[in-house]
Image: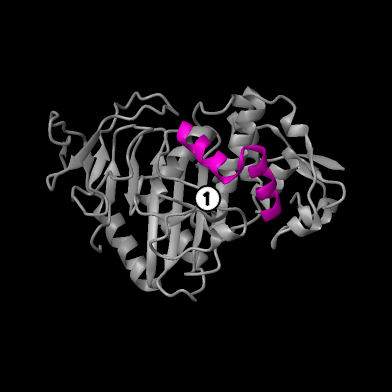
Amino acid sequence: MRNLHTRRLPAALAITVPLVAASSGVSTAASPGVSTGVSTAASPGVSAGVSAGVASAATPYVHRSESAGARVGSTARPPESAVTPTGSYVRPVGSVAVRANVRVAPSVSRALRALEAAFDGRIGAYAVDTATGRTVVYRSRERFPLLSTFKAMACAAVLHKARTSEPGLMSKVVRWSAAEVKPNSPVTAKYVKQGLSVARLCEAAITLSDNTAGNMLLKQIGGPSGLTRYLRTLKDSASRLDRWETELNDWSPGERRDTTTPAAMARGLRAVTVGTALHAKDRDRLNAWLVATETGEARIKAGLPSSWVVGHKTGTGGVYGTAHDVAVVWPDRTSAPIIMAIFTNRKASGADADEKIIARTATILARGLGRL
């Protein structure tokens, strides 16, 4: 049984959101290598390496910003360029030097470095105001584990497949065995015999981060490698999914499997929630699921004004205190959204995650964008 519940979304997203009924278990209710800075040019393809005018070993290359009139959701990517200490962009040897409008954001850098020191860990962040193109980044090209943030992109891949090559996929009923039920599967654990439609699996995977639902969705798109192929169509050359739930959460520093970068995730999320990577109806559906998310209330949402509408997907690991949140945020009902991607981990393998760090990072990013 399903209910229809209208969420308070921005005017452009005021759609009727199908939610799993209560019986389903879903409620309806500066260190070396740090890249920091602000870009004031609108650029859907702006690189993770947009920096505070300081070249670093961790982020030696950046992309030149596009003009302020760049089309929202564009996946065009300018040639790669190396950043010089003066803040100019210089293309690699053999090409012509190009200058771009980049200004330093020392307040963001200082605040995030202090935050890292306080919780003895690492923060990766990328935020872009899609209205102005202004972008704030910090360790945005460093790798972090995807964790359950992959589920948002898996649902985007499923929606795209249903629209372009497999009509009826969203209503297809998928079944699984009791042996396939993974920990943290509050919805799918109750539907082993009946199964659920792909649409309801998307809802469970995003709103409650149901792990079995995540695996069942991956099966619809060719497994972990299928998701990686979809990400490549979004011009994401960094992110990769190699394993299934829950093995994909087994991460340690230096691991490349099942990882992404804050910049790559933010660009991908922008493409599917604001841009043209999905059909408008599918984009609205994905955004509605993100807004209905019940996990991570103490993360990005807690760091922003309560009047702002936040659609997000969390990720939490069991080691190194890994905790993430990626979001599309509407400051008001008529404004263009902000895209945020915040990834964290701690230095000690047995350390606990700290959601307050994510909330405080969100506040710092919003201030860096001039929204607070």
Viewer-proximal residue, 118 or 143? 143
- Number of numbered discs visible in the structure rendering: 1
Crowd class of label 1 (few under 14; some 14 to 19; many from 20; radius 10 Å)? some
Tell me the residue at 34%/61% (across/down). 112
Residue 110 part of the magenta segment? no
Residue range corresponding to the magenta coloring? 211-233
Residue 301, percent from left and from top: 54, 54
Q: Is residue 69 above or below residue 49?
A: above
Residue 136, percent from left and from top: 34, 46
- Judge from the rendering whether residue 117 lies leftward or rightward of residue 359; answer left or right: left
Residue 216 part of the magenta segment? yes
Viewer-proximal residue, 293 or 75? 75
Q: Would residue 97 be visible to someone looking at this image?
A: yes
Q: Amino acid at mark 1?
A: Asp
- Tell me which colouring the rendered structure shows: one colour
Q: Toward which corner of the image does residue 25 lie, by quadrant?
A: bottom right
Provide the residue designation for mark 1.
Answer: 242
Q: Is residue 222 above or below residue 323?
A: above
Q: Is residue 133 above or below residue 180?
A: above
Residue 271, percent from left and from top: 48, 33
- Judge from the rendering whether residue 228 lies leftward or rightward of residue 297; answer left or right: left
Q: Would residue 335 be visible to someone looking at this image?
A: no
Assign a secondary structure to mark 1: loop
Q: Is residue 92 above or below residue 182?
A: above
Tell me the residue at 87%/47% (across/down). 194
Q: Toward which corner of the image does residue 147 lie, by quadrant?
A: bottom right
